[in-house]
Amino acid sequence: MAENAPLVGIIMGSKSDWETMQPAADMLKEFGVEHECRVVSAHRTPDWMNEYAKTAEQRGLEVIIAGAGGAAHLPGMVASQTVLPVLGVPVKSRALNGLDSLLSIVQMPGGVPVGTLAIGDAGSKNAALLAIRILANTRPELREKLHAFQKEQTESVLENSELC
Ligand code: RP5
């Protein structure tokens, strides 16, 4: 596998999901984790979705982050065709504020796991952090960076804790 081959695949059902999924890409970049970002639609490009899911492992990906909104079938359908961990991010939909996306992603039948995150930006950011935690199990340098990230986050909250 090439040294800079992506370890994490960020996929989303539509280009309109990019605003929500960008925080995941930004977080992976901050940690120096190689990744790729692709539009892969369960409904509009089903053959491409199948190909992406079935070849992900042999291409060296270790985690897939899949964001989708509305009838959000992408994370589950991808999880059904790979044994890589799939993290699902419910995109905030226009009609139902993402509750439809959340329920579509979280209610998987037993045997086909999708780790479901919060709706929107927080879910996207946390999907990346969870992917990094998974990768850090075998990469001590990422573990170190996670410790530093957590320490900085705590310090920044404490430094700004006096509100009045
Ligand atoms: C889903 O449909 C996508 O994940 C997106 O959130 C939603 C709407 O897609 P567009 O109509 O904006 O392309 O498949």
Image (cartoon, helix red, strand yellow):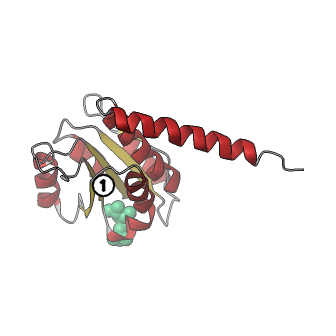
- Residue under the image location 35 percent in, 32 percent down: 140
Picture coordinates of residue 163 (x, y %)? 84, 50
Picture coordinates of residue 109 (x, y %)? 30, 33
- Residue 102 in the figure: left or right of residue 7: right
Which residue is at the far right? 164
- Residue under the image location 36 percent in, 41 percent down: 131
Is 150 situated above or below 12?
A: above
Name the residue tied to disc 1: 10
Q: In which quarter of the image is residue 20?
A: bottom left
Picture coordinates of residue 114 (x, y %)? 33, 38
- Residue 18 in the figure: left or right of residue 48: right
Q: Which amino acid, by three-letter code, is at mark 1?
A: Ile
Picture coordinates of residue 26 (x, y %)? 42, 58
Is 164 situated above or below 26?
A: above
Residue 38 visible: yes
- Residue 109 in the figure: left or right of residue 118: left
SS under mark 1: strand
Number of labels in the image equals 1
Which residue is at the far bottom? 16
